[in-house]
Amino acid sequence: MSKLWGGRFTKPTNKLVEEYTSSIGFDQKLALQDIQGSLAHVAMLGKCDIITQEEVEEIQSGLKTVEKKIQAGDVNYSVADEDIHMNIEKMLIDEIGPVGGKLHTGRSRNDQVATDMHLYLREKTYVLVELVESVQKALVNQAESHVETILPGYTHLQRAQPVSFGHHLLAYFWMFERDKERLQDSVKRINWSPLGAAALAGTPYPIDRQMTADALGFDKPYPNSLDAVSDRDFILEFLSISSIMITHISRLSEELILWSSQEFDFIELDDAFCTGSSIMPQKKNPDVPELLRGKTGRIYGNLMGLLTLLKGLPLAYNKDMQEDKEGMFDTVDTLEGALSLLAPMLDSMDVKADHMKQAVKEDYSNATDIADYLAVKGLPFRQAHEVIGKIVLYAIDQNKYLLDLTMDEYKQFSELFEEDIYDKLAPEQVVAARVSEGATGFQQVYNQIDLAKEHLS
């Protein structure tokens, strides 16, 4: 079969070139978006009297027939027809005859593919926003159940101060909230219409780009035809947002892995989200969070790949840009899978509150509260800090924790100590004492949950 563009050429394309340059193996994902754009385009051609209304109706009918066949899986894509645009146009011409060739009037594959990707990414962005919210809801549900569950808080992976477990989980809620806002804001850039920019310079036909933009739900056409077909910053932005989001997913996954180990033993993941060992029957491996953590590299790679692809391209379209799609598709698939797994895994997670509480009784994470205690009694904080350092060193040497020291032992370091020091050092009191806005104090965490629910509503 001759190429739809074959008039200029005197010999057929080398088969290896056909296979190497064809994109139909992956851009068939854009089939429905391609038809959506074509339906808007042909309606505009008729409205602008570029083709007849009879031709419009015939082409629209043919496109809808092709669309049904695609949805039913009743099509065979051909490498010889290169890409999704040429494959669909060939199917259309096979369906309705030469009049199908009029569909391409006033446009190019350059603006066509850009339009398809804008439509695809807008649709997937809305899907991802919903999936992020499902993870946020799971975090809020667990947080609400564990406001008064006390967890050792860490800095440098060393125990620092006890915190509410609900407070810790809500830290991730707000990370995902910013990810969600970034996705939502990116729609403003996705929602520009490239259609009608043609190959690079526009078209001599009296088309109405605003009409097709409106029909496809875009806010406006690109003001510059060169820009419309040659940049992929809307995909770069998506990949950048995705890289930040997968970082947050990876950090949360790392904590789930640590917490579920025997060394921490703070949580147990549901069996449905773990696997076993082929040789060690006692093992319960947190494979899902490990793989979520591992997927981070591929999304970073997709971002770097597209940045590298675009950095040296002159305006306007270049064949290099065929490489803009697979990374986008892969990132969408990776994030959809990750978020779909993360929400139910969090919901079904068993929190070992007693183990956490025992852990905060067997460390020195309440030391700061002794310094605050002495400071309130008039000792300058810097001096109080030095006193507490000596007390901790003494307690370690005596193989004791701070609540185990007697009053006589405390008095060795300062006469300001009274019996009320033991109440101040109780883990529940240490956490509850944090009353500043956004702190881990129980009432502040309840306030934070109310705020999180407002954001979700």
Image (tube, rainbow, N blue to C red):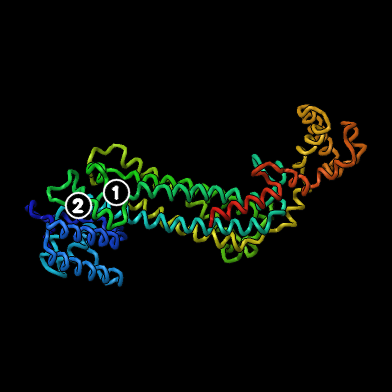
SS category of the residue bearing label 2 = loop
- The type of residue carrying mark 2 is Asp
Q: Nearer the viewer, residue 449 or 47?
A: 47
Q: Nearer the viewer, residue 424 or 264?
A: 424
| Dot label at residue 450 | none
Residue beneath the point at 28% across and 68% down? 70
The reply, left or right, for residue 189 in relation to residue 380 is: left
The reply, left or right, for residue 264 in relation to residue 372 is: left
Q: Which residue is mark 2?
A: 208
Q: Nearer the viewer, residue 10 or 312?
A: 312
SS category of the residue bearing label 1 = strand
Residues at marks 2 and 1 touching, judged by CB atoms closer than 8 Å: no
- The type of residue carrying mark 1 is Lys
Q: Eyeballing the image, is 282 above or below 358? A: below
State whether residue 20 appears in this view: no
Q: Eyeballing the image, is 199 above or below 314? A: below
Q: Position of residue 414 (x, y in %)?
A: 88, 31
Q: Which residue is mark 1?
A: 220
**Real-space CA distance between mark 2 and mark 1, rounded to the nearest whole angstrom:** 12 Å
Point out the tag, 2 or 1, that comes first from the N-terminus: 2
Q: Eyeballing the image, is 241 above or below 85? A: above
State whether residue 347 appears in this view: yes
Residue beneath the point at 77% across and 42% down? 366
